[in-house]
Image (tube, grey):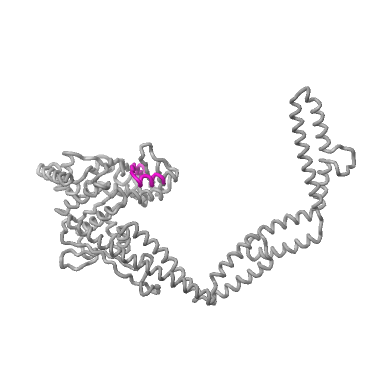
Amino acid sequence: MLEELRITGLGVIDDTTLKLTSGMNVITGETGAGKTMVVTGLGLLFGGRADAGRVRADPGRAVVEGRLRLRGALADAVQTRITEAGAEVDDDGSILLSRTVTIEGRSRAHVGGRSMPVAMLSEVGEQVLAVHGQSDQLRLLRPAEQRGALDRFAGPEHEKLLETYREGFTRWRAVVEDLADRRRNARARSQEADLLKLGLDEITRVDPQPGEDDELRAEVQRLEHAEGLRIAAATAAQALASGVEAADETPDATELLGTARRTLEAQASVDPSLSDLAARLEEAATLVGDVAAELSAYLSSLDADPARLEQIYERRAELRALTRKYADDIDGVIAWAENARTRLAALDTSDEVLEELDKERQRLAAQVGELAQRLTAARAEAAVRFSEAVSVELAGLAMPHARVEVAVVPRTAGKDEPTIDALAVGPDGADEVELRLVAHPGAPSLPLQKGASGGELSRVMLAIEVVFAGAGGPPTLVFDEVDAGVGGQAAVEIGRRLARLARTHQVLVVTHLPQVAAFADRHLVVAKDTGGAITTSGVRIVEETERARELARMLAGLPDSDLGIAHAEELLAVAGREKRG
């Protein structure tokens, strides 16, 4: 749950902190007091788009901070994810989140005290919070959103089936498009294939080997400087060890090391520490002997062979011809050849290849068609359950005769779109999904946007959200004035439904209805302060008499009216009995 929310410098809110509870939290206040800024702050905290126009000029930045405390498997998943990203969980198990937006539009995010991409806030938000507002109602009126909503309601096994279908559909469409392209562009493909074959033939004739150009370059260096290398190696060998005729009687390094070792060994009986130095000189003499032997072998391998040098010049000329045409170096030429062979296979328009592709197309089409039919059946079954559940909720929202139907109808194929046995399959199956409302017995079944008034639409959407919440989802639910256009008994029923939802979820409700606010476990009021030069707003918790006065204000605009307060107290008593029941 979200335990605490602090908002600074956002819209009319200067600096305020919301202490939230695990049940139903209701936020009320006068029109324009800043209730919407609370929802805006939540959106920012969980990765929403930053709007610099909402940042107060003083102090020039808006900051939203929140403390999350999660339990169970969700806590483990979120904590593991943020820990992997380098953030830290507090000692008490809570997680601190923050988002800063400057008046210039720059945005920064922090999770667990560490700077993070804003996308990390979004990732956490998707798991812990769902915001339902009037804009979400409009979104749910779109057919694609309705299909997605039904798929989520159908459950995890259905979503796995949908994912399997999407993978198969993607492969089928790729084969269909590949086959059509090979047939449609056979001539252009043949021309490209001929050019690739010419290049491959040339590279095959030369047969370059990985790293060959570097090896030949090094060998040319040795052959072109063979005499200088021989003199250097011979001089070094002569200095290190005997076996090379010297022009004078100067002793070599091996002799000098031997003399030094023997001299020290002769005095080791006087000072034992000299024996260690003598042993190290013996190791040095051994190393010098090894180097001398290697120099002798190197001298034997040196060969100023003009014929070999000419061969290398010719080979390097062949390799340079390849690097001028195909890549910067020989390894690049080899890679070009590999890519060309792959591309040639893709360009093949032979009857054999076309026949194989057509067989693969038919196999995948059968698979996709079968999966599409299974999806349709699963959606039809979920549609019945969904319709029944939403209709039950509507009965409790003062719409006892209304019924929501979920129509799962065949999809219409687009222009030039391939079908499977007359089945118009798309990325999400072969179905269109539409939510329809039967307002009363005998009324026609109409799409929601046509069959419901404003107040009815709010109740239908709330019923849908309650059903969704019962099917799982994030533990914290935010409802932003979803009760617009509703009043009377229907408003009481909305409050009752939200209170029932709060038994299993943390619920935050921004409302203007006292019938809804009466059901709150915690009532927060956003109030303006016009005493200074600039109007600001703050949030405070109201209880007991103060809460009754706020409900009286919402009921009749008369917070000090004895009759209004009496009505508010009666409303609170009714809500209290309903919640206890």
The residue lying at 82 percent from left, 56 percent from top is 304
Residue positioned most to the top: 270
Location of the N terminus (image quadrant) = top left
Nearest the viewer among 97 and 102 is 97
Q: Say if the magenta span includes residue 60.
A: yes
* Above or below, 276 relative to 288: above
The residue lying at 28 percent from left, 40 percent from top is 19
The residue lying at 27 percent from left, 53 percent from top is 469
* Above or below, 552 relative to 311: above
Q: Position of residue 130 (x, y in %)?
A: 31, 51
Circle count: 0
Q: Say if the magenta span includes residue 440.
A: no
Question: Magenta residues?
Answer: 58-80
Nearest the viewer among 94 and 325 is 94
Task: Classify residue 367 by image quadrant.
Answer: bottom left
The residue lying at 16 percent from left, 64 percent from top is 440
Task: Classify residue 387 by image quadrant.
Answer: bottom left
Nearest the viewer among 7 and 273 is 273
Q: Where is residue 466 in the image (x, y as percent from the top left)?
A: 25, 54
* Above or below, 37 relative to 455: above
Q: In this view, does 341 lie to the left or right of 561?
A: right
Q: Position of residue 576 (x, y in %)?
A: 16, 44
Residue positioned most to the right: 248
Residue positioned most to the left: 563
Q: Is residue 61 left or right of residue 489?
A: right
Q: In this view, does 334 lie to the left or right of 514?
A: right
